[in-house]
């Protein structure tokens, strides 16, 4: 049986997050390249570095718990990235595209918030305290990145988009 | 130009949510049918009714603002549903499957939390106060549904999953 225990489900959730982070790291440069607002560009560039660190945390977890990191392909992130790419392919005013990019990236972040939130609780149940702390770090980073994007959207980007037409 | 203004982006975000809700309504019965825990089954059944009401709210918005609700197919929800179906196809202990279903549904809810959160802010910028209120209602329902699932996971399901093997 593939999912016989909570540990099996936990391992799958780590593999899912690893696939998600890998796909996000691949997708972000193309997204960031299309951003016009300098504060947004900077925020996304620093989030890409955080994403890299989150991926490394997952590698650390996989090594510690003897999990194959490449055991799963995350279909949900595939869909989220497809949606972001669809947006980039549309004919859009730069300020409106910035607002759309924030929306797309926040959706990706929310996927990770849900994923890390669940994996952290599973780690707690399994008594994996160190792993739980690593997952908690990534969870907090994702939540902060989400808030930061809302602040940027509300501070400048949405107003610029409103005045675009 | 397809996305010339914030209003264009707002309309697209409503169409995206409409496609998301439609796909979720189609996917949920198959998911609910596989649930073992009675409290979880009840919570998901009542959330399906909420989802139906959320779809109707979007129809109301589309009618009010003359938006074609079927203008977009939500690739992200397609991916989220694919992932949930992948879980259902795995050979799993019933209690572990319950814990996995909670994780999958929370990911779907987080997509909607991000989506309704953004659409509500766009509506506010556009001075669409009534529409903003409708979106706020759905947003709050999604947040409450997410909390409810965490409570069920932590109350019984995760412990049952832990004892499954």
Image (cartoon, coloured by chain):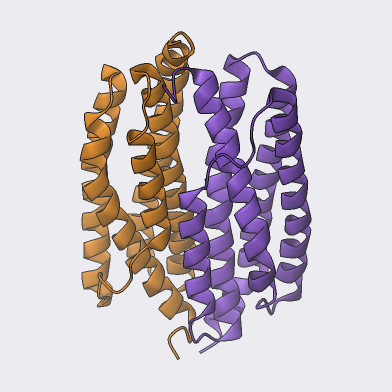
Chain colours: A purple, B orange
Question: x%, y% of residue B8?
Answer: 42, 80
Relative depth, front residue between A92 and A10: A10
Is residue B127 visible in the rendered image? The answer is no
Would residue A54 be found to the left or right of residue B91 on screen?
A: right
Q: Residue at 28% of width from left, 54% of height from top?
A: B23
Q: Residue at 41% of width from left, 49% of height from top?
A: B80
Would residue B118 be found to the left or right of residue A52 on screen?
A: left
Q: Quadrant of residue A27?
A: bottom right
Question: x%, y% of residue B157?
Answer: 41, 17
Q: Quadrant of residue A112?
A: top right
Question: x%, y% of residue B62?
Answer: 25, 70
Q: Residue at 27% of width from left, 75% of height from top?
A: B67
Relative depth, front residue between B54 and A125: A125
Question: x%, y% of residue B52?
Answer: 21, 48
Where's the N terminus of chain A, which quadrant?
top left
Instruction: Give the vertical position of B107 relative to B97 (above or below).
Output: below
Please give the count of numbered marks on the rendered protein: 0
Would residue A69 be found to the left or right of residue B89 on screen?
A: right
Would residue A145 be found to the left or right of residue B162 on screen?
A: right
Is residue A69 visible in the rendered image? The answer is yes
Q: Quadrant of residue A130?
A: top right
Instruction: Give the vertical position of A5 relative to B33 (above or below).
Output: above
Instruction: Give the vertical position of A6 relative to A32 (above or below).
Output: above
């Amino acid at each position: 049986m593939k999912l016989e225990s909570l540990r099996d489900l936990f391992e799958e959730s780590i593999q899912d997050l690893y696939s998600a982070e890998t796909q996000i790291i691949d997708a972000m440069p193309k997204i960031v390249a299309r951003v016009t607002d300098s504060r947004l560009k900077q925020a996304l560039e620093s989030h890409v570095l955080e994403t890299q660190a989150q991926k490394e945390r997952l590698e650390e977890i996989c090594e510690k718990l003897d999990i194959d990191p490449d055991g799963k392909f995350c279909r949900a992130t595939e869909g989220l990235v497809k949606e972001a790419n669809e947006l980039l392919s549309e004919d859009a005013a730069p300020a409106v595209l910035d607002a759309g990019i924030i929306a797309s990236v926040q959706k990706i972040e929310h996927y990770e918030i849900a994923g890390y939130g669940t994996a952290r609780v599973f780690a707690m149940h399994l008594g994996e305290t160190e792993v739980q702390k690593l997952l908690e770090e990534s969870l907090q980073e994702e939540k902060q990145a989400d808030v930061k994007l809302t602040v940027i959207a509300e501070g400048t980007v949405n107003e610029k988009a409103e005045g675009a037409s």
